[in-house]
Image (spheres, helix red, strand yellow):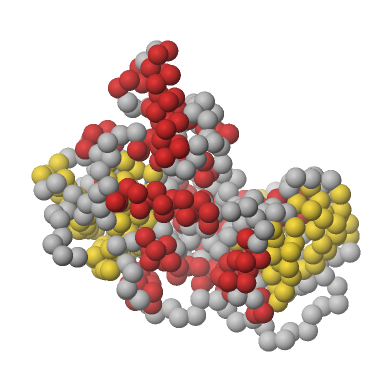
Amino acid sequence: MASAPPPILTLTGITKSFPGVRALDGVDLDVLPGEVHCLLGQNGAGKSTLIKVISGAHRPDEGEIAWNGESVQLLRPTSAMSLGIATIYQELDLVEHLSVAENVHLGHENARAGFVRRGAARQTTAALLTRLGHPEISPDRIVATLSAAGKQIVSMARALSHDVKLIVMDEPSAVLDPDEVNNLFRIVADLTADGVAVVYISHRLEEIRRIGDRVTVLKDGRAVARNLPAKSTPTREVVALMTGRDTDQVFPDRPAGAPRAAEPVLRVEGLTRAGEFAPVDLDVYPGEIVGLAGLVGSGRSEILETVYGARRPDAGHVTVEGRRLRPGSVTSAVRAGLGLAPEERKAQGLFLLDSVTRNVSISSLPRFARGGWLNRSGERAAARARTTELSLRPDNPDVQIRTLSGGNQQKAVLARWLLRECKVLLLDEPTRGVDVGARAELYALIRRLADDGVAVLLVSSEIPEVLGLADRVLVLREGTVVHTAPARELDEHRVLDLVMEGSPA
Ligand SMILES: Nc1ncnc2c1ncn2[C@@H]1O[C@H](COP(=O)(O)OP(=O)(O)OP(=O)(O)O)[C@@H](O)[C@H]1O
Ligand SMILES: [Mg+2]
């Protein structure tokens, strides 16, 4: 960089505590106009707290905020918004029962508006959606009916409906498939070309390399490295800064040529749902991890949910240890020993006011019941064992789950499924939102379950994850299994080719 422009935003010595936790401890950050400034750090490091300080959602206990060199107080979100700071939150904050256009114009002056202005609001919304590459989203659509990716676009449209100078994005790519990520990056490039600054959070280091300019690494509420070059800092160095240790091996070893049991635990034959997936045949043997690779919309999650009985197949059946399950019956599946850790983990069952322990143990409670009493210490110890294995923070099973960071909440729900003693474990995007360090631990845990004889069926949009963790991989394209091979015979390019081939550009 020749002569760097002065920062648009400067944070100095920002501190923020919650009861029992110092989430931010003297953090400095500066953001330049037109740059993509990435925040990296493990789950619970303080990233979301920091961006909530920037967006006026949290007031810092100590520290200074300067905007274009002038000290400012961001007392509430509208103070930040009026300076030109917009935020796309990790847990999107749209009003679900309102339309797209109404959401985009919430908080605008002309929102009070009658009929005529409503027309104008719809027009500007339509224009913004087109600019964001999604002209097909109608301004009149009710937000609740949109996919997670669609909601994010609406959140983005709302940000751009203001005169935005800085846009903060908290793990925007976590809900996107590769095409949608490309669209997001195109939007980011357009914004920065216009001089807009972007603060970007992601657990995917390859994204930081693609669009990042500078990186600030947070660890336990402190900035342990500032303004590293995003493209040239070695991954190993970044991970070591985040975790405080040197991690080399991410994926656990596969068992060396272990003899395969004669019979599969899980057998899926001719399973079909019109419009979702063509007849699928697959077997998973005890101790085996089978991966399903494919794009969002390729039918991956639908297959898992149908195997689990949460969707009713049009044809075909599922057999566990030779016993045929009742189609479309979760009860039948659970009785036979199936467990599903679903993709939308947060939406599917966090008990926000309950402790971490109860959120983890909830599906295994019968195990801790003795003669009408709940063995609470047994429950707590079992839950704790799982959360410790996943390095859930804070390491206190009694806190309310609502106080955990996004990634740690994910870990808790995952721990719930790992605690249940299943014969067949169906995992949908198990590492979404989970930091790089904890991923390695999660992979090791999944492999240990397999080594204990559990059959694992894994869905992930991250191809390296499927290739690194699974023994066997099924590649899906538009609801059809187009290829099956041992993971070690495939590489990422080959899988990408298979996944994309013939799909419309
Ligand atoms: N409202 C709250 N009450 C109590 N503790 C909180 C609250 N919000 C955050 N924390 C704590 O502050 C710390 C930082 O959380 P934060 O959400 O900023 O992490 P993060 O870096 O965004 O993590 P992730 O990658 O998991 O999203 C965590 O220890 C978390 O438990
Ligand atoms: Mg967060």
Please give the name of the residue rendered at 49% of the width and 80% of the height, measured from the top-left corner: 249
Name the residue nearer the viewer: 152 or 456: 152
**Would residue 431 be seen by someone viewing this image from the given angle?**
yes
Q: Estimate the x, y position of residue 201 in percent, counting from the top left.
A: 37, 56
Looking at the image, which residue is at 32% across and 48% down?
191
Q: Nearer the viewer, residue 310 or 161?
A: 161
Q: Position of residue 248 (x, y in %)?
A: 45, 81
> Does 63 sit above or below residue 269?
above
- The answer to whether residue 419 is seen in the rendering is no
Identify the image quadrant of residue 253.
Answer: bottom right
Q: Is residue 158 above or below residue 12?
A: above
Question: In which quadrant of the rendered image does the N terminus lie?
Answer: bottom left
Q: Quadrant of the C terminus?
A: bottom right
**Taking 223 as reference, is 250 left or right?**
right
From the viewer's perspective, is 126 left or right of 414? left
Q: Nearer the viewer, residue 64 or 79?
A: 79
Q: Is residue 453 above or below residue 153?
A: below
Residue at (65, 80) in percent of width and height: 488
For the point 69% across and 70% down, the residue is: 473
Q: Position of residue 459 (x, y in %)?
A: 64, 61
Quarter of image, res 6:
bottom left
Q: Position of residue 411 (x, y in %)?
A: 52, 58
Instruction: State the residue in front, 19 or 451.
Output: 451
Name the residue furthest left: 70
Residue most toward the bottom? 256
Query: Is 161 left or right of 253, judged from the image as shown?
Result: left
